[in-house]
Amino acid sequence: MAGDLVDHHVHGVVATSLERDQFELLANEGGRPAPAGTSHFDTPVGLAILTGCGPLLDLAPDCTPERYLEARAALGAVEVNRRLLAAAGLDALLVETGHRPGDVLDPAAMGRLAGATAHEVVRIERAAEDHARGCDGPDDFLAGLGAALDAAASAAVGLKSVVAYRHGFDLAVEPPDHEGVRRATEAWFREFGAATAPRLAAPVLLAHVLHAAIEVAASRRLPVQVHAGFGDTDLTMHRADPSQFTPWVRELEGRGVDVVFLHCYPYHRQAGYLANVFPNVYFDVGCMAHYTGPSAGTVIAEALELAPYPKQLYSSDGFGLAEFVYLGAVLFRRHLDRVLDGWVDAGDCPRASADRIRELIGAGNARRLYRLDDEEPR
């Protein structure tokens, strides 16, 4: 049903036409070309693109990659993005703006193309890096960090951390001591300088910035999204298991902040456990709908095994390709319906309960968690 989904974690899409090699790189999380003689189209997500998106470009579902990319180029990026984003049938998008912001559309443009309300989610580490670029030195950075994070969050509906990429979830939860933070900041500024593009990676600084961001989240009543599990080669997979973030979950709970684990595969069962036992934990299976393609129902069914239904959300995690925003929505609806219909047919779930579960996960939980209907200032 159009308009029944809130995509609570999505990025911008590319606004220019793409050559085949550029398209294939965006269609794979590894960010590398496929081995010689093979193609990223020969994957579950490649199959989903051709079968699911081909008809929206006036092609048959069994079109070839060559024909698909020819049609995409002939229509042009603006028309392709318009068709695919509008066809996703979204009510709202929560756009995380910290990943390659100059290369993709901003939240306002995404909202216009999708015919949906758009909101911003701020990436914590990038906000700290942006602050560092404008500082005279370590003292200036540390003195203004809290205010900079608060300013970045002023119009946002949530914050997002990529600590799983920068270090891993096995990050010490104890607040670092002042001297340790200062030494790490001085080393960071010596290495990069405030005028370059510094990458926040030192564990002491990651922990310090995350604690500062949690203060902002608590004061503004914002949830904190955290990337978990499946992602590109910057992360080491076993260190992105959400169960390793449990000490931080307890810290966030004590400070009144909700945490949302994103994507989670293959650790979606661990995320479901955390959502079951901690009142401040939410999660999604994100981009796995399109990356697993025909098998998306298996992942969705496993996510539903243990977690409370008011603790799960929908997202596409679409980045770069509008195909991902569309496929995420279509495959999520299709496979969630199949799972819930199976429960109804088996006598395990009344139809009214299935409809409520569908509404909660698709939109209701996101509207409540991110206060999308709240008129109070954040």
Image (cartoon, helix red, strand yellow):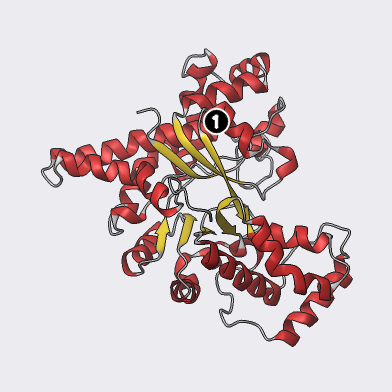
Does residue 242 lie above or below 340 as drawn?
below
State whether residue 38 appears in this view.
Answer: no
Q: Residue at x 58, y 83 (%)?
A: 174
Quadrant in the rendering for residue 91: top left
Residue 119 position within the rendered picture, expressed as x and y whole percent measured from the top left: 56, 43
Q: Nearer the viewer, residue 16 or 214?
A: 214
Badge 1 amino acid: Glu
Q: Position of residue 101 (x, y in %)?
A: 71, 44
Mark 1 secondary-structure assignment: helix
Q: Pinpoint residue 314: horizontal percent, then vertical percent.
A: 42, 45
11 in relation to 283, above or below = above
Whether residue 172 appears in this view of the structure is yes
Q: Residues within 10 Å of mark 1 (few under 14, many from 20)?
A: many
Q: Is residue 216 left or right of residue 136?
A: left
Residue at the (40%, 34%) spot, across then down: 331
Total numbered labels: 1
Residue drawn at x 88%, y 65% is: 193
Q: Quadrant of the N terminus?
A: top left
Q: Nearer the viewer, residue 67 or 231?
A: 231
In the displayed structure, 115 sits above or below 351; it is: above
Identified at 71% across, 33% down, the residue is 22
Q: Is residue 134 left or right of residue 169?
A: right
Quadrant position of residue 153: bottom right
Residue labelled with disc 1:
323
